[in-house]
Image (tube, rainbow, N blue to C red):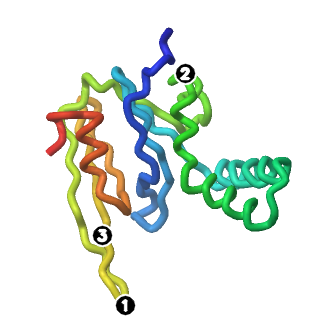
């Protein structure tokens, strides 16, 4: 069965810059043994997940704080839904989803960049995936190295 345990890793909250880096699209990387699927996450998708979680909590008889907690969990754990989906369904979920074959990936680099604001420095990670089709660049607010190594092994630098 193709979808049974074919997903080997999920990495949420990846941002792909657009329009001179001022705006970005959010993606979740869903990796199978054969391909890396980049699933676009829209605000409408997140809003729907939050509403569904609230409605489910309400139906279970949870009060205000129980519903609020369910809503928070839905937004933080949104990417987990991909663990129960087939690769075909993930690719077809949004017209802007795309995939690349893992065999074509030459290297994956994750570099920490510091982001400065008035009061503190926060980590910003840049991820570059080099493949035969070109380079894909993403940004992340968390250290992606462990997840990338679990997915791509020795290709991660």
Nearer the observer: mark 2 or 3; the answer is: 3
Asked whether 21 or 70 is in front, the reply is: 70
Indicate which disc residue 50 carries.
Answer: none
Q: Is residue 35 above or below residue 124?
A: above
Residue 145 x %, y %: 25, 49
Tell me the residue at 30%/69% (across/down): 123
How packed mark 1 is, by other alpha carbons closer than 10 Å (few <14, some 14-19, many 20 or more), is: few
Instruction: Give the residue number, with chain letter if any, for mark 1.
Output: 118
Nearer-N-terminus badge (1/2): 2
Nearer-N-terminus badge (1/3): 1
The CA span between labels 1 and 3 is 14 Å
How packed mark 3 is, by other alpha carbons closer than 10 Å (few <14, some 14-19, many 20 or more), is: some
Instruction: Give the residue number, with chain letter if any, for mark 3.
Output: 123
Instruction: Give the residue number, with chain letter if any, for mark 2.
Output: 88
Q: Residue 106: which quarter of the image?
A: top left
Tell me the residue at 41%/57% (across/down): 17
Q: Is residue 110 left or right of residue 136?
A: left
The CA span between labels 2 and 3 is 34 Å
Secondary structure at badge 2 equals helix
Q: Residue 65: which quarter of the image?
A: bottom right
């Amino acid at each position: 069965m193709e979808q049974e345990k074919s997903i080997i890793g999920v990495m949420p909250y990846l941002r792909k810059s657009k329009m001179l880096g001022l705006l970005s699209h959010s993606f979740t990387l869903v990796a199978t043994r054969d391909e890396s699927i980049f699933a676009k996450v829209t605000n409408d998708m997140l809003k729907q997940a939050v509403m569904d979680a609230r409605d489910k909590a309400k139906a279970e008889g949870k009060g205000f704080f129980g519903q609020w907690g369910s809503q928070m969990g839905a937004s933080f754990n949104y990417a987990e839904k991909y663990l129960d989906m087939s690769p075909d369904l993930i690719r077809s979920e949004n017209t802007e989803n795309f995939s690349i074959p893992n065999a074509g990936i030459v290297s994956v680099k994750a570099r920490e960049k510091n982001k400065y604001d008035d009061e503190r420095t926060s980590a910003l990670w840049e991820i570059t995936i080099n493949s035969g089709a070109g380079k894909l660049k993403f940004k992340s607010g968390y250290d992606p190295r462990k997840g990338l190594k679990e997915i791509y092994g020795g290709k991660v630098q």
